[in-house]
Image: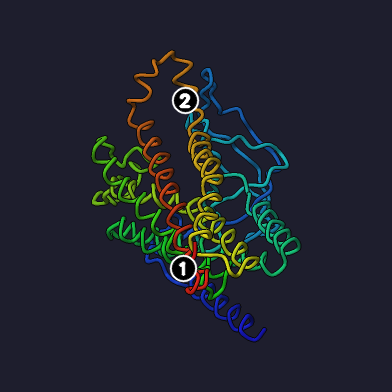
Amino acid sequence: MKHRFSFLVGISIVIVVLIFLPTGFEGALQFKDAEKCKVLVEEVDNSSLIDTGLIRTGQQICKVRFLTGRFEGQTSFGWNMLGGSLSQDKLFRPGDKAQAVVHHDEGEIISINLIDYYRLDGELVLAIAFALFLICFARGVGLRSVLSFVITILVLWKILVPLFLKGYNSIFVGLVAVAIMTFVILLFVYGLDKRLLSSFFGSMSGIIFAMILSIICSKAFHIHGAVMANSEALLYSGFADLNLTQIFMASVFIGASGSVMDLSVDITSAVSEVVRNCPDISTKKAIKSGLAVARAAMGTMTTTLLLAYSGSCIAFLMTFMAQGTPVYNILNNNVVAAEIINTIAGSFGLAMTAPLTAFISGILLTNKDNFTKA
Protein backbone atom coordinates (compact mmCIF):
# COMPACT_ATOMS: atom_id res chain seq x y z
CA MET A 1 0.00 0.00 0.00
CA LYS A 2 2.85 2.32 0.89
CA HIS A 3 4.55 1.63 -2.44
CA ARG A 4 1.35 2.40 -4.36
CA PHE A 5 0.95 5.69 -2.52
CA SER A 6 4.58 6.65 -3.22
CA PHE A 7 4.09 5.70 -6.88
CA LEU A 8 0.97 7.86 -7.22
CA VAL A 9 2.73 10.79 -5.51
CA GLY A 10 5.67 10.43 -7.89
CA ILE A 11 3.41 10.32 -10.94
CA SER A 12 1.47 13.35 -9.67
CA ILE A 13 4.74 15.27 -9.36
CA VAL A 14 5.68 14.30 -12.93
CA ILE A 15 2.29 15.53 -14.19
CA VAL A 16 2.65 18.86 -12.37
CA VAL A 17 6.17 19.32 -13.77
CA LEU A 18 4.95 18.59 -17.30
CA ILE A 19 2.03 21.00 -16.92
CA PHE A 20 4.34 23.87 -16.01
CA LEU A 21 7.16 22.84 -18.34
CA PRO A 22 7.67 25.67 -20.87
CA THR A 23 7.53 24.66 -24.52
CA GLY A 24 9.50 27.65 -25.75
CA PHE A 25 6.64 28.87 -27.91
CA GLU A 26 4.59 30.72 -25.29
CA GLY A 27 5.71 34.07 -26.73
CA ALA A 28 4.50 33.10 -30.21
CA LEU A 29 0.82 33.27 -29.23
CA GLN A 30 -1.40 35.22 -31.57
CA PHE A 31 -3.38 37.98 -29.90
CA LYS A 32 -1.13 37.67 -26.83
CA ASP A 33 -1.80 41.30 -25.94
CA ALA A 34 -5.56 40.90 -26.23
CA GLU A 35 -8.22 39.71 -23.80
CA LYS A 36 -9.57 36.20 -24.41
CA CYS A 37 -13.02 35.66 -22.97
CA LYS A 38 -16.39 33.93 -23.19
CA VAL A 39 -19.36 35.90 -24.49
CA LEU A 40 -23.09 35.35 -24.96
CA VAL A 41 -24.53 36.32 -28.34
CA GLU A 42 -27.70 38.36 -27.72
CA GLU A 43 -28.47 39.78 -31.17
CA VAL A 44 -27.16 39.23 -34.71
CA ASP A 45 -27.15 41.32 -37.89
CA ASN A 46 -26.70 39.27 -41.08
CA SER A 47 -27.36 42.11 -43.54
CA SER A 48 -23.70 42.24 -44.62
CA LEU A 49 -23.49 38.55 -45.55
CA ILE A 50 -23.19 37.57 -49.22
CA ASP A 51 -24.45 34.16 -50.37
CA THR A 52 -23.04 32.68 -53.59
CA GLY A 53 -24.28 29.13 -53.90
CA LEU A 54 -22.65 27.16 -51.09
CA ILE A 55 -20.21 29.97 -50.41
CA ARG A 56 -21.03 32.57 -47.78
CA THR A 57 -18.75 35.56 -47.25
CA GLY A 58 -18.91 38.91 -45.52
CA GLN A 59 -19.28 39.79 -41.87
CA GLN A 60 -21.84 39.13 -39.18
CA ILE A 61 -22.33 41.80 -36.53
CA CYS A 62 -23.24 40.41 -33.12
CA LYS A 63 -24.30 42.11 -29.92
CA VAL A 64 -22.59 40.23 -27.14
CA ARG A 65 -22.51 40.20 -23.35
CA PHE A 66 -19.23 39.31 -21.65
CA LEU A 67 -19.44 36.28 -19.36
CA THR A 68 -15.78 36.25 -18.28
CA GLY A 69 -12.78 38.56 -18.24
CA ARG A 70 -12.26 42.17 -17.22
CA PHE A 71 -15.36 43.29 -19.12
CA GLU A 72 -17.68 40.74 -17.50
CA GLY A 73 -21.30 41.92 -17.47
CA GLN A 74 -20.80 44.58 -20.15
CA THR A 75 -22.34 44.47 -23.62
CA SER A 76 -20.81 45.52 -26.91
CA PHE A 77 -20.75 44.65 -30.62
CA GLY A 78 -18.39 42.08 -32.14
CA TRP A 79 -17.46 40.97 -35.63
CA ASN A 80 -17.68 37.49 -37.09
CA MET A 81 -15.80 37.35 -40.40
CA LEU A 82 -16.75 34.67 -42.95
CA GLY A 83 -14.23 33.72 -45.63
CA GLY A 84 -16.23 31.21 -47.66
CA SER A 85 -14.89 28.07 -45.96
CA LEU A 86 -17.47 25.58 -44.69
CA SER A 87 -14.87 23.98 -42.41
CA GLN A 88 -13.76 27.25 -40.81
CA ASP A 89 -16.75 29.61 -40.91
CA LYS A 90 -19.55 29.68 -38.34
CA LEU A 91 -22.81 31.61 -38.16
CA PHE A 92 -23.91 32.63 -34.68
CA ARG A 93 -27.49 32.83 -33.43
CA PRO A 94 -28.91 34.57 -30.36
CA GLY A 95 -28.21 32.43 -27.31
CA ASP A 96 -24.93 30.98 -28.63
CA LYS A 97 -21.83 31.20 -26.48
CA ALA A 98 -18.69 32.24 -28.32
CA GLN A 99 -14.98 32.60 -27.79
CA ALA A 100 -13.97 36.22 -28.32
CA VAL A 101 -10.71 38.13 -28.58
CA VAL A 102 -10.98 41.69 -27.33
CA HIS A 103 -8.49 44.39 -28.27
CA HIS A 104 -8.58 47.28 -25.85
CA ASP A 105 -6.61 50.33 -24.79
CA GLU A 106 -6.54 51.16 -21.08
CA GLY A 107 -9.93 49.56 -20.49
CA GLU A 108 -11.60 51.00 -23.61
CA ILE A 109 -12.73 48.34 -26.09
CA ILE A 110 -11.29 48.84 -29.57
CA SER A 111 -12.57 45.74 -31.35
CA ILE A 112 -14.13 42.35 -30.63
CA ASN A 113 -13.48 39.35 -32.89
CA LEU A 114 -15.65 36.29 -32.45
CA ILE A 115 -13.27 33.39 -33.04
CA ASP A 116 -15.45 30.30 -32.62
CA TYR A 117 -18.14 28.66 -30.54
CA TYR A 118 -17.16 28.29 -26.89
CA ARG A 119 -16.62 24.58 -26.33
CA LEU A 120 -14.35 24.44 -23.28
CA ASP A 121 -17.17 23.84 -20.79
CA GLY A 122 -18.53 20.90 -22.76
CA GLU A 123 -15.05 19.44 -23.31
CA LEU A 124 -14.33 19.68 -19.58
CA VAL A 125 -17.61 17.95 -18.69
CA LEU A 126 -16.89 15.20 -21.22
CA ALA A 127 -13.36 14.65 -19.86
CA ILE A 128 -14.56 14.54 -16.24
CA ALA A 129 -17.37 12.11 -17.13
CA PHE A 130 -14.88 9.86 -18.91
CA ALA A 131 -12.49 9.92 -15.95
CA LEU A 132 -15.27 9.22 -13.43
CA PHE A 133 -16.58 6.33 -15.50
CA LEU A 134 -13.14 4.74 -15.66
CA ILE A 135 -12.53 5.19 -11.94
CA CYS A 136 -16.00 3.93 -10.91
CA PHE A 137 -15.86 0.94 -13.23
CA ALA A 138 -12.23 -0.13 -12.82
CA ARG A 139 -11.32 1.61 -9.54
CA GLY A 140 -7.54 1.52 -9.09
CA VAL A 141 -6.93 0.40 -12.66
CA GLY A 142 -9.28 3.14 -13.88
CA LEU A 143 -7.38 5.78 -11.90
CA ARG A 144 -4.10 4.59 -13.37
CA SER A 145 -5.66 4.68 -16.84
CA VAL A 146 -6.70 8.30 -16.32
CA LEU A 147 -3.21 9.23 -15.12
CA SER A 148 -1.58 7.48 -18.09
CA PHE A 149 -4.00 9.28 -20.42
CA VAL A 150 -3.01 12.64 -18.92
CA ILE A 151 0.71 11.89 -19.10
CA THR A 152 0.41 10.80 -22.75
CA ILE A 153 -1.28 14.09 -23.67
CA LEU A 154 1.35 16.10 -21.77
CA VAL A 155 4.28 14.24 -23.35
CA LEU A 156 2.84 14.83 -26.82
CA TRP A 157 2.07 18.52 -26.23
CA LYS A 158 4.95 19.54 -23.97
CA ILE A 159 7.80 17.44 -25.37
CA LEU A 160 7.09 15.86 -28.75
CA VAL A 161 5.46 18.78 -30.59
CA PRO A 162 7.91 21.48 -29.34
CA LEU A 163 10.92 19.35 -30.28
CA PHE A 164 9.44 18.76 -33.74
CA LEU A 165 8.96 22.51 -34.16
CA LYS A 166 12.53 23.21 -33.04
CA GLY A 167 13.83 21.05 -35.87
CA TYR A 168 15.16 18.05 -33.96
CA ASN A 169 15.31 14.72 -35.77
CA SER A 170 11.65 13.74 -35.81
CA ILE A 171 12.23 10.00 -36.13
CA PHE A 172 14.60 9.85 -33.16
CA VAL A 173 12.45 12.17 -31.02
CA GLY A 174 9.30 10.25 -31.95
CA LEU A 175 10.87 6.90 -31.09
CA VAL A 176 12.15 8.14 -27.71
CA ALA A 177 8.79 9.75 -26.88
CA VAL A 178 6.89 6.58 -27.83
CA ALA A 179 9.29 4.49 -25.74
CA ILE A 180 8.74 6.75 -22.72
CA MET A 181 4.96 6.74 -23.11
CA THR A 182 4.88 2.98 -23.67
CA PHE A 183 6.98 2.30 -20.58
CA VAL A 184 4.94 4.65 -18.38
CA ILE A 185 1.59 3.28 -19.57
CA LEU A 186 2.71 -0.32 -19.10
CA LEU A 187 4.08 0.61 -15.69
CA PHE A 188 0.57 1.73 -14.76
CA VAL A 189 -0.84 -1.57 -16.03
CA TYR A 190 1.64 -4.03 -14.53
CA GLY A 191 3.82 -2.17 -12.06
CA LEU A 192 7.45 -3.25 -11.70
CA ASP A 193 6.91 -6.76 -12.96
CA LYS A 194 8.30 -9.19 -15.54
CA ARG A 195 5.11 -8.62 -17.51
CA LEU A 196 6.18 -4.99 -17.92
CA LEU A 197 9.43 -6.04 -19.58
CA SER A 198 7.69 -8.61 -21.77
CA SER A 199 5.07 -6.18 -23.02
CA PHE A 200 7.53 -3.30 -23.39
CA PHE A 201 10.08 -5.20 -25.47
CA GLY A 202 7.32 -6.77 -27.56
CA SER A 203 5.76 -3.35 -28.22
CA MET A 204 9.04 -1.65 -29.07
CA SER A 205 10.01 -4.41 -31.49
CA GLY A 206 6.82 -3.84 -33.45
CA ILE A 207 7.14 -0.05 -33.29
CA ILE A 208 10.75 -0.13 -34.52
CA PHE A 209 9.76 -2.41 -37.39
CA ALA A 210 6.92 -0.02 -38.32
CA MET A 211 9.40 2.86 -38.16
CA ILE A 212 11.84 1.15 -40.52
CA LEU A 213 9.04 0.27 -42.93
CA SER A 214 7.67 3.84 -42.88
CA ILE A 215 11.10 5.21 -43.82
CA ILE A 216 11.61 2.70 -46.64
CA CYS A 217 8.09 3.07 -48.09
CA SER A 218 8.00 6.87 -47.86
CA LYS A 219 11.20 7.09 -49.88
CA ALA A 220 10.20 4.33 -52.31
CA PHE A 221 6.75 5.87 -52.97
CA HIS A 222 8.13 9.45 -53.13
CA ILE A 223 5.76 10.67 -50.41
CA HIS A 224 6.32 14.25 -49.29
CA GLY A 225 5.32 15.22 -45.76
CA ALA A 226 3.09 17.97 -47.16
CA VAL A 227 0.35 15.33 -47.52
CA MET A 228 -0.32 15.88 -43.81
CA ALA A 229 -3.16 18.30 -43.07
CA ASN A 230 -2.06 21.90 -42.32
CA SER A 231 1.60 21.06 -42.95
CA GLU A 232 2.05 23.70 -45.67
CA ALA A 233 0.49 26.36 -43.44
CA LEU A 234 3.14 25.42 -40.87
CA LEU A 235 5.91 26.14 -43.38
CA TYR A 236 4.45 29.54 -44.21
CA SER A 237 4.21 30.38 -40.51
CA GLY A 238 7.97 30.75 -40.19
CA PHE A 239 9.03 27.09 -40.02
CA ALA A 240 10.27 26.66 -43.59
CA ASP A 241 13.26 24.58 -42.45
CA LEU A 242 11.14 21.76 -41.04
CA ASN A 243 11.57 18.34 -42.62
CA LEU A 244 7.91 17.46 -43.19
CA THR A 245 8.72 14.09 -44.75
CA GLN A 246 10.63 13.06 -41.65
CA ILE A 247 7.73 14.19 -39.48
CA PHE A 248 5.35 12.12 -41.63
CA MET A 249 7.57 9.06 -41.15
CA ALA A 250 7.45 9.60 -37.39
CA SER A 251 3.68 10.04 -37.45
CA VAL A 252 3.27 6.57 -39.00
CA PHE A 253 4.80 4.62 -36.12
CA ILE A 254 3.47 7.02 -33.48
CA GLY A 255 -0.05 6.42 -34.80
CA ALA A 256 0.43 2.64 -34.75
CA SER A 257 2.00 2.54 -31.26
CA GLY A 258 -1.34 2.42 -29.43
CA SER A 259 -2.57 -0.70 -31.24
CA VAL A 260 0.85 -2.32 -30.95
CA MET A 261 0.87 -1.71 -27.21
CA ASP A 262 -2.67 -3.05 -26.88
CA LEU A 263 -1.76 -6.27 -28.67
CA SER A 264 1.38 -6.79 -26.58
CA VAL A 265 -0.62 -6.34 -23.36
CA ASP A 266 -3.26 -8.85 -24.53
CA ILE A 267 -0.65 -11.50 -25.31
CA THR A 268 1.43 -10.88 -22.19
CA SER A 269 -1.65 -11.01 -19.95
CA ALA A 270 -2.85 -14.21 -21.62
CA VAL A 271 0.50 -15.94 -21.16
CA SER A 272 0.66 -14.66 -17.57
CA GLU A 273 -2.74 -16.18 -16.79
CA VAL A 274 -1.75 -19.49 -18.34
CA VAL A 275 1.43 -19.60 -16.27
CA ARG A 276 -0.39 -18.56 -13.11
CA ASN A 277 -2.94 -21.35 -13.47
CA CYS A 278 -0.35 -23.90 -14.63
CA PRO A 279 2.89 -23.03 -12.80
CA ASP A 280 4.65 -26.14 -14.14
CA ILE A 281 3.93 -25.37 -17.79
CA SER A 282 6.97 -25.52 -20.03
CA THR A 283 8.33 -22.47 -21.78
CA LYS A 284 7.59 -23.97 -25.18
CA LYS A 285 3.94 -24.57 -24.31
CA ALA A 286 3.61 -21.08 -22.85
CA ILE A 287 4.99 -19.62 -26.08
CA LYS A 288 2.61 -21.79 -28.08
CA SER A 289 -0.32 -20.49 -25.99
CA GLY A 290 0.83 -16.92 -26.59
CA LEU A 291 1.04 -17.51 -30.32
CA ALA A 292 -2.51 -18.90 -30.34
CA VAL A 293 -3.77 -15.71 -28.70
CA ALA A 294 -1.63 -13.61 -31.05
CA ARG A 295 -3.14 -15.18 -34.17
CA ALA A 296 -6.67 -14.52 -32.95
CA ALA A 297 -5.95 -10.92 -31.90
CA MET A 298 -4.07 -9.97 -35.07
CA GLY A 299 -7.12 -10.55 -37.23
CA THR A 300 -9.09 -7.77 -35.57
CA MET A 301 -6.16 -5.46 -34.78
CA THR A 302 -5.12 -5.01 -38.40
CA THR A 303 -8.73 -4.29 -39.32
CA THR A 304 -8.86 -1.74 -36.50
CA LEU A 305 -6.01 0.20 -38.09
CA LEU A 306 -7.65 0.02 -41.52
CA LEU A 307 -10.96 1.35 -40.21
CA ALA A 308 -9.26 4.09 -38.18
CA TYR A 309 -7.31 5.46 -41.14
CA SER A 310 -10.18 4.96 -43.62
CA GLY A 311 -12.59 6.80 -41.33
CA SER A 312 -10.31 9.83 -41.22
CA CYS A 313 -10.38 10.23 -45.02
CA ILE A 314 -13.90 9.02 -45.86
CA ALA A 315 -14.87 12.35 -47.49
CA PHE A 316 -11.77 12.12 -49.66
CA LEU A 317 -12.81 8.65 -50.87
CA MET A 318 -16.38 9.86 -51.47
CA THR A 319 -15.02 12.65 -53.68
CA PHE A 320 -13.13 10.13 -55.80
CA MET A 321 -16.24 7.99 -56.24
CA ALA A 322 -18.49 10.97 -57.00
CA GLN A 323 -16.10 12.07 -59.73
CA GLY A 324 -15.85 8.57 -61.19
CA THR A 325 -12.11 8.37 -60.61
CA PRO A 326 -10.71 4.95 -61.65
CA VAL A 327 -9.35 2.77 -58.85
CA TYR A 328 -5.99 2.77 -60.67
CA ASN A 329 -5.77 6.56 -60.24
CA ILE A 330 -7.04 6.44 -56.65
CA LEU A 331 -4.38 3.97 -55.51
CA ASN A 332 -1.69 6.02 -57.24
CA ASN A 333 -2.74 9.26 -55.53
CA ASN A 334 -0.11 10.53 -53.07
CA VAL A 335 -2.59 11.04 -50.20
CA VAL A 336 -4.02 7.54 -50.63
CA ALA A 337 -0.51 6.12 -50.89
CA ALA A 338 0.35 7.87 -47.61
CA GLU A 339 -2.66 6.24 -45.91
CA ILE A 340 -1.63 2.88 -47.37
CA ILE A 341 1.79 3.33 -45.77
CA ASN A 342 0.09 4.21 -42.48
CA THR A 343 -2.07 1.09 -42.61
CA ILE A 344 0.44 -1.43 -43.93
CA ALA A 345 3.38 -0.23 -41.81
CA GLY A 346 1.21 -0.29 -38.70
CA SER A 347 -0.15 -3.73 -39.59
CA PHE A 348 3.37 -5.04 -40.15
CA GLY A 349 4.29 -3.63 -36.75
CA LEU A 350 1.41 -5.58 -35.22
CA ALA A 351 2.42 -8.71 -37.11
CA MET A 352 5.94 -8.45 -35.67
CA THR A 353 4.75 -7.61 -32.17
CA ALA A 354 2.51 -10.67 -31.80
CA PRO A 355 5.03 -13.52 -32.14
CA LEU A 356 7.87 -11.62 -30.47
CA THR A 357 5.73 -10.77 -27.44
CA ALA A 358 4.59 -14.39 -27.20
CA PHE A 359 8.20 -15.54 -27.36
CA ILE A 360 9.49 -12.99 -24.82
CA SER A 361 6.62 -13.49 -22.36
CA GLY A 362 6.98 -17.28 -22.63
CA ILE A 363 10.63 -17.01 -21.62
CA LEU A 364 10.30 -14.33 -18.93
CA LEU A 365 7.14 -15.53 -17.21
CA THR A 366 7.83 -19.26 -16.94
CA ASN A 367 10.15 -20.94 -14.49
CA LYS A 368 13.65 -21.25 -15.93
CA ASP A 369 13.70 -24.88 -14.82
CA ASN A 370 10.82 -25.55 -17.22
CA PHE A 371 12.62 -24.16 -20.28
CA THR A 372 13.71 -27.51 -21.66
CA LYS A 373 10.50 -29.37 -20.87
CA ALA A 374 8.39 -30.59 -23.77
- Residues 105 and 198: in front is 198
Image x and y of residue 191, in percent: 56, 73
Give residue 317's mark: 2
For residue 150, what is the image quadrant? Answer: bottom right
Q: Is residue 32 visible?
A: no
Residue under numbered circle 1: 371
91 over 261 or under it: above or below: above
Q: Quadrant of the N terminus?
A: bottom right
Q: Position of residue 254 (x, y in %)?
A: 42, 52
The relative height of residue 345 versus residue 270 in the rendered view (above or below) is above
Q: Amino acid at mark 2?
A: Leu
Is residue 234 at least partly visible in the picture? yes
Please state the horizontal and vertical placement of residue 249, each as a whole percent of the image.
Answer: 32, 47
Q: Going from the N terminus, do you reach mark 1 or mark 2 first?
A: 2
Residue at 44% of width from left, 14% of height from top? 323
In this orientation, which residue lies closer to the viewer: 319 or 307? 307
Residue 356, x across and y down, in percent: 42, 56
